[in-house]
Amino acid sequence: MIITHLSAECYPIAKIGGLADVLGALPKYQNELGATAQVVMPFYNNKFTKTHKFKPVYNDTILMGETDYDFRILTLVDNNLGFDIYFVDVPELLYSDFVYTSDDTERFLAFQIAALDWIAQGETLPDVIHCHDHHTGLIPFMAQESYRYSMLRKIPVAFTIHNAQYQGAFSHDLVYLIPEFKFSRVGLLDWNHLINPLASAIKCSWIVSTVSPSYMDELKENANGLEKLLSDEHAKCIGILNGIDTEVWNTETDPLIIENYTQDTIEQGKQANKEWLCKEFNLDVNRPLFAFIGRLVEQKGADLFPKIFSESLFGNDISILLLGSGEKHTENELRNLKTKFGNKYNAFIGYDEKLSHIIYAGADFLLMPSRVEPCGLNQMYSLKYGTIPVVNSVGGLKDTVEDIFDGGFGICHNNVTVSEVCEAIERANAFYYTDKFKLTRSDIMSIDHSWHASAKSYINVYNSLNPFL
């Protein structure tokens, strides 16, 4: 079975959110199951592409409206990712050090057209085309409706919604950029009088998945305007929980943390990582250490962080360390807290991969008060590293974290308000001083959230689309 994944992100090449982590692991685990999975993504001008060598495997020209764009398909000279990866190089549109810009319509449309042009001319066509998020959302329509891709019409197209809040909608004035199709079919592109790639993908894909069962249920009530569409298409919708790459996220072998550890050596290992963090960020190592890693946006509850952190730090003998970036107003408020709370609080505004690993290893609790969390990977990383998650029970967080007082292993709350999150932090702080705390953080390291089961679930979905695969 040949599976071609198309995505705007893939770890470690380009990462903005959890989408990259998924594409950096799922194909590898599918290959271990006997499939031939590959990834096709844009070629960006970033750190990865500047430090690796590439070779061309195809070149051609795409016509978008009245403009010709030359493109190449590149692949890595030395590839140790565990799957083949191909890069769509459209220098005039995609060659940027930013994955996303303020107007990505033509950039990602060019990526999708060039990718399909290359796939369509191949001697061996894929058995399944699997698209991820709105940046690839027009591929299901084009593969089904555009005349130039008629050879692809019988190939099953799967589509995964990683985050329904972002849909990539644009004006019908730009419909001429899409390869020619029978115009009576234009309704498959439309939602609320705009061309909506996410809506079109839901209409045209053979199967639509989300990254957790609970998130699929929630989308029928909160999908940024697509609730009715998802309800109408429910027969082809399924939720499959993401996994994590346990070869990368392994406390015993992780080269990025200060001291490696196992379940048997967790106390010593976590203490060494915590001591490094506290020294580096001027925090008191004797206090419970709460951490946040992620984007500072409303979806993650970050707009409430200044008040949550202020109240929690004032009322409890704890420390908080933050790693993230996002909305500038929130960033500035969180920077300003440093002078207010001395050695109880610090923030690294930005992103650092090594630091994130050390925080998972050294923190006592991980904060995830997300309003929306399609799957969430951070809570799975924290469990693997023996760090207890404090979460809002939505989406994938609801599917992966059970409350400690209901026989589970995390601290859960049901609303994202200052009072509820502060109360959850207080509960976690109290739990830190109980005999059960150390036992729990050792036990959670053995919870299996690897990609094995999820990769198999996707293979089963593909087989259901075409029993001859």
Image (cartoon, helix red, strand yellow):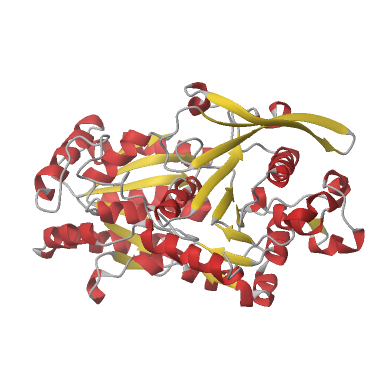
Q: Is residue 148 left or right of residue 75?
A: right
Note whether residue 20 is visible: yes
Residue 415 in percent (x, y) is at 43, 67
Residue 407 in percent (x, y) is at 22, 75
Q: Is residue 67 left or right of residue 91?
A: right
Quadrant for the N terminus, please: bottom right
Residue 78 in percent (x, y) is at 45, 28
Q: Quadrant of residue 45?
A: top right
Q: Is residue 460 left or right of residue 387?
A: right
**On screen, residue 8 above or below 417:** above
Who's the residue at 58% across and 46% down the image? 7
Quadrant for the C terminus, please: bottom right
Of residue 422 and residue 148, the one placed in the foreground of this image is: 148
Who's the residue at 59% across and 68% down the image? 468
Note whether residue 433 is visible: no
Who's the residue at 26% across and 62% down the image? 447
